[in-house]
């Protein structure tokens, strides 16, 4: 299991943004029992040794409180992933293994609090949270592709991220219902999805390459029919 635990931080010297991310793992641990709400926030602050009133300032009450907590947790996992798997460490792997490794890291990082993941997915699925949830999925997918070395700036930049965000979302849905040893079914599902995408990308690349060749072939046939004078 991948651990995201670090040395006890000095909460008093943190900005509110830093505090949100620092408290996120403890909030997730409390959310297993209490859900993503102020009860979990208070329990997390007390457990971590942070000032409860300051923690409430970081996550003010209201409709967005739960999503604020979930976003902080996603950010925490994003940062841990970037630290554990920088580009130079991933460079030795094939592209599909880079993506599989990054998604697997995220799953292993939250495996011990999978009930918090289940509760988070329920919150994110609420209609008023959908835009923000999509944004979070896109952001994590973008970080994964950048770590994997992707430098695309054309439409491939967007399709790759949209597809990976979809794979990650679908994998999480399997993850929260997987009672197999070591989440074996989840990792098998992830492997199949990534293999399918790689086959699609290969076919797409061949099609686009062929498509780029068509104009020159058309010009050649045109010259045969209408020779230049």
Image: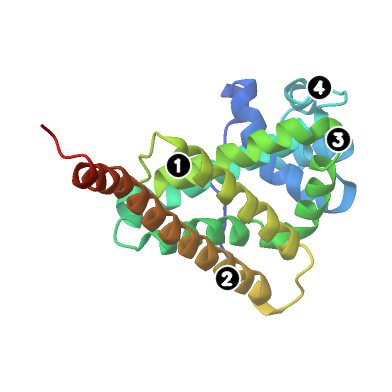
Callout 4–callout 1 Cβ contact below 8 Å: no
Query: Which mark is first along the chain, 4 or 2?
Result: 4
CA distance for labels 4 and 3: 21 Å
| Residue 9 makes an appearance in the image | yes
| The label number, if any, that marks residue 127 in the structure image | 3
83 versus 55 height, above or below: below
Quarter of the image that includes the N terminus: bottom right
Residue in the foreground of this view, choosing between 15 and 220 = 220
Quarter of the image that includes the C terminus: top left
CA distance for labels 1 and 2: 21 Å
180 left or right of 42 in image: left
What residue is disc 1 on? 156
Q: Residues within 10 Å of mark 4 (few under 14, many from 20)?
A: some
93 versus 65 height, above or below: below
54 versus 224 height, above or below: above
What residue is disc 4 on? 60
Q: Secondary structure at mark 2?
A: helix
Callout 2–callout 4 Cβ contact below 8 Å: no
Quadrant of residue 219 in the image? Answer: top left
| Residue 8 makes an appearance in the image | no
Q: Residues within 10 Å of mark 1 (few under 14, many from 20)?
A: few
Spot occupied by residue 29 in the image (x, y as percentages of width and height): 75, 51
Residue in the foreground of this view, choosing between 199 and 207 = 207
| The label number, if any, that marks residue 192 in the structure image | 2
Look at discs 1 and 2 and give the one toward the viewer.
Answer: 1
């Amino acid at each position: 299991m991948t651990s995201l635990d670090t040395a006890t931080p000095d909460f008093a010297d943190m900005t509110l943004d830093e505090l949100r991310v620092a408290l996120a793992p403890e909030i997730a641990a409390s959310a297993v029992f209490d859900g993503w709400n102020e009860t979990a926030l208070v329990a997390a602050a007390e457990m971590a040794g942070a000032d409860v009133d300051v923690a409430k300032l970081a996550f003010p009450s209201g409709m967005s409180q739960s999503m604020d907590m979930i976003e902080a947790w996603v950010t925490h996992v994003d940062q841990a992933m970037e630290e554990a798997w920088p580009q130079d460490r991933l460079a030795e792997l094939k592209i599909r293994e880079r993506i599989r490794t990054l998604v697997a890291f995220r799953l292993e990082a939250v495996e011990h609090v999978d009930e918090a993941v289940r509760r988070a997915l329920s919150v994110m699925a609420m209609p008023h949270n959908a835009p923000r949830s999509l944004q979070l999925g896109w952001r994590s997918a973008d970080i994964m592709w950048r770590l994997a070395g992707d430098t695309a700036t054309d439409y491939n930049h967007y399709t790759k991220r949209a597809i990976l965000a979809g794979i990650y979302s679908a994998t999480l849905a399997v993850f929260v219902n997987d009672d197999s040893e070591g989440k074996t079914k989840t990792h098998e599902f992830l492997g199949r999805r990534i293999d399918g995408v790689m086959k699609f990308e290969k076919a797409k690349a061949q099609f686009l390459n062929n498509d780029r060749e068509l104009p020159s072939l058309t010009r050649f046939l045109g010259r045969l029919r209408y020779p230049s004078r």
